Image: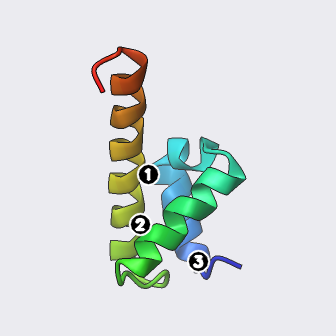
Amino acid sequence: MLGFSESNIVSLLVDQPRALLKTSNKFTEIVNAVKEMGFFPQTSMFNIAIYTWVDADEQIDVGVEAGGI
């Protein structure tokens, strides 16, 4: 279990649905990395950290695809 509260899952689904479109392994990797950074899954800051990580991950993917990285 990843430790999300129900309200944070709903918030993530409403505010950042593309975060949930990641493969389950990738999403678990992101969640675990955010936990290791000291964010608690029961807080709204945890979701903000997830959003930020997903956005950064997508920007890196775009850079790699474009040959820039």
Badge 3 element: loop
Q: Which residue is mark 1?
A: 15
How far apart are the two marked residues, 3 and 2, measured between alpha carbons? 9 Å
Say if 15 sits above or below 46 in the image.
above
Which is nearer the N-term, disc 1 or disc 3? Answer: 3
Q: Amino acid at mark 3?
A: Phe
The numbered disc on residue 47 is: 2
Horizontal arrangement in the rendering, residue 55 relative to residue 42 (left or right): left
Q: Which residue is mark 3?
A: 4
Q: Amino acid at mark 2?
A: Asn
Say if 38 sits above or below 68 in the image.
below
Horizontal arrangement in the rendering, residue 2 relative to residue 39 (left or right): right
Q: Amino acid at mark 1?
A: Asp
User: How dense is the environment of label 2, judged by Cα within 10 Å: few (below 14), some, or many (20 and up)?
Assistant: many
Horizontal arrangement in the rendering, residue 69 relative to residue 33 (left or right): left
Residue found at x 40% / y 82%: 43
Q: Which quadrant would the C terminus be assigned to in this image?
A: top left
Of residue 47 and residue 67, the one placed in the foreground of this image is 67
Image depth: mark 1 or mark 3 in front: 3
Determine the residue located farthest toward the top in the rendered image. 66
Residue 30: x percent and y percent? 50, 60
Residue found at x 58% / y 77%: 4
Do labels 1 and 3 touch, CB within 8 Å? no
Residue 64: x percent and y percent? 39, 25
